[in-house]
Image (cartoon, rainbow, N blue to C red):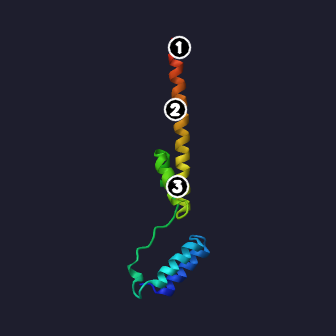
Amino acid sequence: MATLSEELSTLKELLDKGIITQEEFESKKAQLLAAPAGSLSNQVPSGTDDGGVGWLVLGLFIPIVGLILYLVWKDTKPLSAQQAGKGALIGFIIGIVGYIALTAMGASMLYSY
C-alpha cells in the first residue's frame, strides 16, 4: 500500500522523465490530495505507453482503426499513437498503390484483345 508521499514522488519522477505532461501531473496530484486517506490502494494503475509494434500492425491491416487510435491517443499515449498512425499511413498507401496497379492491369487486359 503506497503512501501519499510515495505516490507524489512517483508522479514527480514520471514528470521529470517526460513520461507524463505537466497537466497530467497537476491533475493526478489534485486527485491524490483530494482522495480520502487509505483509498490510494484501491486505484487501478493506468497502462503504460510503450509504443508497441502491435499498434503499427493493427493500423497497417485496418488503416481506419489506426487513424482513429492516432486521433484518440495523440495527447495521452503519444508513442502508441505514433505507431498506430504510421501503420494507418502505410496501410492507406499500400491500398492506393494496389488499387492503381489492379486498375492498370484490368485496363491493359481490356485493350489486349
Q: Secondary structure at mark 2?
A: helix
Locate residue 40, reporting x and y percent. 42, 82
- Mark nearest the camera among 1 and 3 is 3
Q: Residue furthest top?
A: 113
Residue ID at (52%, 32%): 99
Q: Amino acid at mark 2?
A: Tyr
Q: Position of residue 35 (x, y in %)?
A: 43, 83
Q: Identify which amino acid the numbered label 1 is placed on.
A: Ser
Residue identifier under label 2: 99
Residue 57 shows in this picture: no
Residue 74 placement (x, y as % from top left): 55, 59
| Front residue of 72 and 50 | 72
Q: Amino acid at mark 3?
A: Tyr
Residue for point 56% across, 75% down: 14
In the displayed structure, would residue 80 be above or below residue 24? above
Q: Kindly identify which residue carries mark 3.
A: 70
